[in-house]
Amino acid sequence: QVQLVESGGGLVQAGGSLRLSCAASGSIFSIDGMGWYRQAPGKARELVATISSVGITNYGDSVKGRFTISRDNAKNTVYLQMNSLNPEDTAVYYCVTGPRRGLLLGKVDYWGQGTQVTVSS
């Protein structure tokens, strides 16, 4: 079992920035890919970004150039730096783990509890 605890969500004005963190614990030896999904009200969950154990990254089209995912393997933590936020980024952001390629297809092994990000116009 892997436990994921997110932090860093909140309310920000359009154009602002936030940094999300996600700390993993438990059977961390089994962790391959880590990443973030998000879900806005009335919409399906959407891939935000993923990162492999060696730093290979992938981003959803809607966040490319604005968001940056990073990972500290020594701390078992993944980060999401979000810049140039707009109201369409408002959603619950979920930390995930799973096979790196699988994460791109929604094949998630573990989900965090989610953290709310709200961007006001």
Image: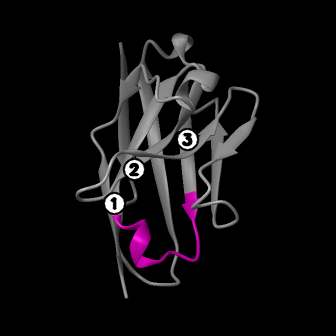
Image coordinates of residue 78 in percent, x first then y, are 55, 41
Q: Earlier in the sequence, mark 1 or mark 2?
A: 2
Image coordinates of residue 69 in percent, x first then y, are 63, 49
Q: Which residue is mark 3?
A: 78
Pointers 1 and 2 in contact (C-beta within 8 Å): yes
Whether the magenta-drawn stretch holds residue 85 is answered as yes
Q: Quadrant of the N terminus?
A: top left
Residue type, label 2: Arg
Residue type, label 3: Val
Give the CA separation, mark 3 to mark 2.
15 Å
Q: Is 109 displayed left or right of 113 in the figure?
A: right
Q: Decide: few, some or many residues near mark 3? Use Cα within 10 Å; few <14, some 14-19, many ≥20.
A: many
The structure residue drawn at horizontal position 30% and vertical position 54%, both measured from the top left corner, is 43
Whether the magenta-drawn stretch holds residue 114 is answered as no
Q: Earlier in the sequence, mark 3 or mark 2?
A: 2
Image quadrant in which you'd find residue 101: top right
Q: Is 55 displayed left or right of 102 in the figure?
A: right
Q: Which residue is mark 1?
A: 91
Q: Which residues are magenta?
A: 81-90
The structure residue drawn at horizontal position 56% and vertical position 22%, both measured from the top left corner, is 102
Q: Which residue is mark 2?
A: 38
